């Protein structure tokens, strides 16, 4: 019977005890390291969460009033939020900064007005700029933005009124004035479209600006009038409008007298008046003779800030310069032709 039990002094007992101790130590060591890792990861997750979620309005209030960060740091943070399109957070920071005794109150107000404008809160933006101008009437930056706000609100008379103080500050307002007058005429519902076209043309002959804006309208409402008064020096600049005209609206007499138009409409396969072109895209399309479904696509570059837009603009939404769009074209697949051929195949 005694042979089934291991004696206390038996060497086997010592070996079993040794391995048991090693097992217990390894077991606890394994679970402790697992627990430690999960705690570390939890802490890191909690820490990183602070950067993923933005501080709430109340948290901002406490942080800004505590003065732990300098005003400049808050302005930089607000600017960075605004640049990333988070206008709401940027506006909250500016508003909180204005509540404390800010050393840069006028600058903060200007930045707040600018952010309201970018976010599309035009009425609030207007109130901010008017309030800056009430105490500091000779602030051209605020006047410029107030002009933009009135323009976006389609209050063209108020925008024209802003030009007066800008003129007094020796700013060149001629192009702004022409642009606002043209916009006001285009948005005037009481004037007949054909009468508007005549008035726009008469204005254009005086200043020779905003050709794209003016000819786009005239070609749309009265193509015959546009061709009769066509400014051939702007042919290249108006390429996209000319390219998209219907065949029935062309004036072949004028086209046949203008080398650029002959090449453009030969590339479009409306006429056959050129055998080639110095413009690569036109040359390829002329050689293809309309046998492939290739066409031109257009994009617009602001000559002032070099931002590229897929649509035409009269005032650049990035730098706010007027009449700086330069049209550029490239060869592309004619999806419209594909679509119309597919539709015809079902008939
Ligand atoms: Zn621009």
Image (spheres, rainbow, N blue to C red):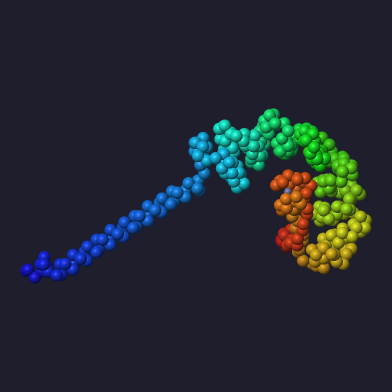
Q: Which residue is at the front of the view, 243 or 344?
A: 243
Q: Position of residue 228 (x, y in %)?
A: 91, 49
As drawn, is 100 to the left or to the right of 1?
Answer: right
Which residue sits at x=84%, y=46%? Answer: 209
Tell which residue pokes out farthest to the top in this image.
Answer: 134
Which residue sits at x=82%, y=60%? Answer: 268
Asked where in the image residue 154 lies, by quadrant, the reply is top right
Visible residue check, residue 257: yes
Which residue sits at x=68%, y=34%? Answer: 129
Q: Position of residue 39 (x, y in %)?
A: 37, 52
**Is 144 above or below relative to 333?**
above
Instruction: Work out which quarter of the rendered image holds the N terminus and state it.
Output: bottom left
Q: Which residue is at the front of the view, 42 or 172?
A: 172
Which residue sits at x=21%, y=64%? Answer: 20
Q: Which residue is at the front of the view, 180 or 270?
A: 180
As drawn, is 227 to the left or to the right of 31?
Answer: right
């Amino acid at each position: 019977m005694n042979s089934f039990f291991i004696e206390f002094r038996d060497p086997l007992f010592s070996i079993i005890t040794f391995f048991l101790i090693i097992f217990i130590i390894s077991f606890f060591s394994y679970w402790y390291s697992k627990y430690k890792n999960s705690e570390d990861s939890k802490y890191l997750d909690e820490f990183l969460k602070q950067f993923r979620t933005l501080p709430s309005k109340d948290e901002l209030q406490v942080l800004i009033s505590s003065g732990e960060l300098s005003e400049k740091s808050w302005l930089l943070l607000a600017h960075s939020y605004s640049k990333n399109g988070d206008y709401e957070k940027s506006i909250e920071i500016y508003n909180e900064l204005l509540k404390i005794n800010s050393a840069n109150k006028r600058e903060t107000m200007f930045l707040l007005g600018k952010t309201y404008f970018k976010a599309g809160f035009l009425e609030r933006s207007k109130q901010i700029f008017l309030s800056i101008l009430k105490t500091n009437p000779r602030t051209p930056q605020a006047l410029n933005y107030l002009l933009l706000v009135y323009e976006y609100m389609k209050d063209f008379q108020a925008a024209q009124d802003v030009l007066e103080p800008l003129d007094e500050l020796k700013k060149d307002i001629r192009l702004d004035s022409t642009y606002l007058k043209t916009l006001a005429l285009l948005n005037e519902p009481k004037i007949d479209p054909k009468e508007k076209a005549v008035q726009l043309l008469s204005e254009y002959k005086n200043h020779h600006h905003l050709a794209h804006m003016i000819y786009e309208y005239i070609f749309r409402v009265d193509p015959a009038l546009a061709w009769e008064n066509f400014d051939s020096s702007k042919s290249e600049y108006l390429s996209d409008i000319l390219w998209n005209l219907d065949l029935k609206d062309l004036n072949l007499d004028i086209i046949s007298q203008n080398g650029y138009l002959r090449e453009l409409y030969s590339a479009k396969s409306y006429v056959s008046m050129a055998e080639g072109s110095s413009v690569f895209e036109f040359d390829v399309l002329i050689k293809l003779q309309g046998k492939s479904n290739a066409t031109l696509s257009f994009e617009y570059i602001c000559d002032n800030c070099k931002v590229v837009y897929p649509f035409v603009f009269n005032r650049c939404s990035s730098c706010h310069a007027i009449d700086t769009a330069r049209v550029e074209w490239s060869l592309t697949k004619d999806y419209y032709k594909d679509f119309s051929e597919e539709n015809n195949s079902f008939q």
